[in-house]
Image: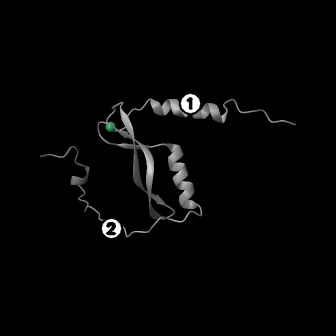
Amino acid sequence: MSRSSPSTSLEDWLDYSTEVSNVFRCTVCGADGCHEEMVDEIFHLAGQYVLVDNMPAAVCNRCGDRTLSADTVERARVMVHGQTEPVKSIPLIVYELPQDGEKAITWPPTA
Ligand SMILES: [Zn+2]
């Protein structure tokens, strides 16, 4: 007894993903140019902050917004939740902006 194969093979899907990622459009400023850069990013996972370094990201040429591929995020997630030993552990300094009820929703800022 054989199961029917899915309409889209993994290979087709990967081709499709690559094609989509080549058509970059910044979700922040709408620019269509980007370059690849190795970046770090802080994830909030399993109740703690985890810094993952050396991840390839598409960086917008205009505003510098960084986009990580779903594959990269998934690989980082698996690594953090898995048995991989962290490279190192560093203290994290946390600040919080004091919230003013009225000013917090004023946008754009007035000079
Ligand atoms: Zn941008």
Query: For the residue marked with disc 2, what is the amino acid?
Result: Ile
Examine the rendered structure and indicate whether residue 51 appears above or below residue 38: below
* Residue 29 in the figure: left or right of residue 109: right
Seen from this angle, which residue lies furthest left? Answer: 111
Q: Quadrant of residue 13?
A: top right
Residue 107, horizontal then vertical, whole percent: 23, 45
* Residue at 29%, 36% in the rendered image: 62
Contact, CB < 8 Å: mark 2 with mark 1?
A: no
Marks 2/1: CA distance? 41 Å
Quadrant housing the N terminus: top right
- What type is the residue that disc 1 sits on? Tyr
Q: Residue at x 55, y 51 (%)?
A: 75
Judged from the image, the quadrant occupied by ligand 1 is top left
> Considering the numbered disc 2 on the image, is that residue within a helix, a strand or a loop?
loop
Residue under pointer 1: 16
- Describe residue 93's horizontal placement relative to residue 81 as left or right: left
What is the number of the mark on residue 60? none
Which sits in the foreground, 66 or 27? Answer: 66
Asked whether, in this view, residue 89 is left or right of residue 2, the answer is left
The residue shown at (54%, 34%) is: 17
Q: Residue furthest right?
A: 1
Q: Quadrant of residue 61?
A: top left
Ligand 1 within 8 Å of disc 1? The answer is no
Identify the mark nearer the N-term, 2 or 1. 1
From the top left corner, tell me how far across and down residue 72 is, in percent. Answer: 51, 47
Front position in the image: 78 or 107: 78
Residue labelled with disc 2: 93
**Which SS class for mark 1?**
helix
Q: Position of residue 68 (x, y in %)?
A: 45, 44
Q: How many marks?
A: 2
